[in-house]
Image: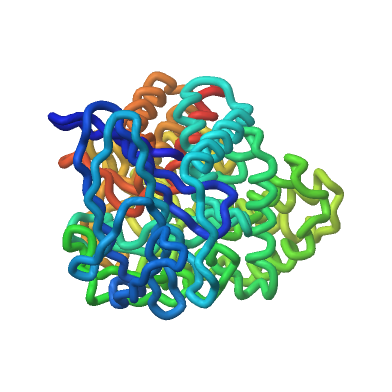
């Protein structure tokens, strides 16, 4: 989590080192310029705009003459450096040179404007502390096996996406990076999705990071606490529930992809799969010893009572489509998972539960899905009841325990995905050209879905294919091991918000599956 970039020119070479200090007050970004060879002329430009580009701050010199403060409304940013600064065209600029062996540092810190300027951060000690923190954290990883470097890198990514104060993990730290170049599939992912809970908990637990798993589980229980009919699919970092979506018309978007969105209207959608993911996560936490057997059980029972009333209704599905509710097959499968996991918890830990009723509902859902979500003619599960579209979520049918890997319906579904959803060997989540999601067609292949296919291959014993696909996916990572949500094979570029926690959890899960075979 310390980025070093080398710049070589005719006159010499410099290293630019960027990082965010750990354990410091406020939020800082430190940039250190180190001379490695010769003497290099450098420039610095800082153009601060608050409120998504609308507010130009008032910039003044700090009283201690160590830099500038920039204030607009409730926001303040402080830039500290020993390099002389000047204002030029509503920007702060500096020109300087760095010789071999010399170090020049810049520290940019955010703070509320009603408080005094934050205390200075000493750049070099902060760098040492930050390197030590991440080295110590990485050394705690208990996973040692195939693809170890990739697993460790993805675990660090999940840790870096975690808000330390609450344990919440954002889906991505960005908004509106397009899923299609120049398109409208631009969403704000700076929130915590419940469906990330299962894979994230498993990833941290299996790698020996029980503190992080406990913090994530505690965030999960706090966020869903309250009336069961008000459970949302996503929340803010602290569990905030009011997440209005609005567009920012004055911003052009990444390479012209508009609209730019802030907030996410999916927070108001009904997505039945989240009940399965929550119950699966809490079951794993309980069996992994992260909580006592009774922790959160009353809340789970309340949620299950509500799910009993609504599981047969249509929903918007895991992909948060905006084409209206349907009876999504995977949503019903995950409703089955919800009942299956609470039944397992109750049986294993002797918890008080209406087991006969839950078992009856579990069987009813299973029968309904197999009857209405399966196309016998094509020998595959379909995206929604009465539909002929495919959906990559159905690659998880055996991973979630709904059917065994050797079941002909599982084998047939994998074959159908291979026929209809592959692009250059990678997996589309579904065919957007059918227009069923309420948006214009077109997007990249979905990286998590491609990992799911490798996982499905492994469960079927197709190990050579599983490893080949997994290694192709690893090769798509950028130079520092990060993956976005999607990938465009034709132009070989990553698409969507970045880095994407869902993709990295799928990477870890698939690596663990391959290691176990």
Horizontal placement of 329 versus 214: left or right? left
Front position in the image: 235 or 304? 235
Q: Quadrant of residue 483?
A: top left
Q: x, y percentage for residue 431? A: 27, 53
- State whether residue 176 appears in this view: yes
Q: Position of residue 371 (x, y in %)?
A: 49, 53
User: Which residue sits at x=35%, y=63%?
Assistant: 187
* Residue positioned 35% across, 74% down in the render: 51
Q: Can residue 384 be seen in this view?
A: no
User: In the rendered image of this protein, does residue 330 appear above or below residue 73?
Assistant: above
In this view, 322 is above or below 508: below
Q: Position of residue 62 (x, y in %)?
A: 42, 66
> Is 124 or 184 nearer to us in this picture?
124
Is residue 77 placed above or below 460 in the rendered structure? Answer: below
Count every numbered label the image shows and give the total.
0
Work out whether 297 lies above or below 248. Answer: above
| Residue that sits furthest to the left in the current view | 10
> At 44% across and 73% down in the image, what residue appears?
75
């Amino acid at each position: 989590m310390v980025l070093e970039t080398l710049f070589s020119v005719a006159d010499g070479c410099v290293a630019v080192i960027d990082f965010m200090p750990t354990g410091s007050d406020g939020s800082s970004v430190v940039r250190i310029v180190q001379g490695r060879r010769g003497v290099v002329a450098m420039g610095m430009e800082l153009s601060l705009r608050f409120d998504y580009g609308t507010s130009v701050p008032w910039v003044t010199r700090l009283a201690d003459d160590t830099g500038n403060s920039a204030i607009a409304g409730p926001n303040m940013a402080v830039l500290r450096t020993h390099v002389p600064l000047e204002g030029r065209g509503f920007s702060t600029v500096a020109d300087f040179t760095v010789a071999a062996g010399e170090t020049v540092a810049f520290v940019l810190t955010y703070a509320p404007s009603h408080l005094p300027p934050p205390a200075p951060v000493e750049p070099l000690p902060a760098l040492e502390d930050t390197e030590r923190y991440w080295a110590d954290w990485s050394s705690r990883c208990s996973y040692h096996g195939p693809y170890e470097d990739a697993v460790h890198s993805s675990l660090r990514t999940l840790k870096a996406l975690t808000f330390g104060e609450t344990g919440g993990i954002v889906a991505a730290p960005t908004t509106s990076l397009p899923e299609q170049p120049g398109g409208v599939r631009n969403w704000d992912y700076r929130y915590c999705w419940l469906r990330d809970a299962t894979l994230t908990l498993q990833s941290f637990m299996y790698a020996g990071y029980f503190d992080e798993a406990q913090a994530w589980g505690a965030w999960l229980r706090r966020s869903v606490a309250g009336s069961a009919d008000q459970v949302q699919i996503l929340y803010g970092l602290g569990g905030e529930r009011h997440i209005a979506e609005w567009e920012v018309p004055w911003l052009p978007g990444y390479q012209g992809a508009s609209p730019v969105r802030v907030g996410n209207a999916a927070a108001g959608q009904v997505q039945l799969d989240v009940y399965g993911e929550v119950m699966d996560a809490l079951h794993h936490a309980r069996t992994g010893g992260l909580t006592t057997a009774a922790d959160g059980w009353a809340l789970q029972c309340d949620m299950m009572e509500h799910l009993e009333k609504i599981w047969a209704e249509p929903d918007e599905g895991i992909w948060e489509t905006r084409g209206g509710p349907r009876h999504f097959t995977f949503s019903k499968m995950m409703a089955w998972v919800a009942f299956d996991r609470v039944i397992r918890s109750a049986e294993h830990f002797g918890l008080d539960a209406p087991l006969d009723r839950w078992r009856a509902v579990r069987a009813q859902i299973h029968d309904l899905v197999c009857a209405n979500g399966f196309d016998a003619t094509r020998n595959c599960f379909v995206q929604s009841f009465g539909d002929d579209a495919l959906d990559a979520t159905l690659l998880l049918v055996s991973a979630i325990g709904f059917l065994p890997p050797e079941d002909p319906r599982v084998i047939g579904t994998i074959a159908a995905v291979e026929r209809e959803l592959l692009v250059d060997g990678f997996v589309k989540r579904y065919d957007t050209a059918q227009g069923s999601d309420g948006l214009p067609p077109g997007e990249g292949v979905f990286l998590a879905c491609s990992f799911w296919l490798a996982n499905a291959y492994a469960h079927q014993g197709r190990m050579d294919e599983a490893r080949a696909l997994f290694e192709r996916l690893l090769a798509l990572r950028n130079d520092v091991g990060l993956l976005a949500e999607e990938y465009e094979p034709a132009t070989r570029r990553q698409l969507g918000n970045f880095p994407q926690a869902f993709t990295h959890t799928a990477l870890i899960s698939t690596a663990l599956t391959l290691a176990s075979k």
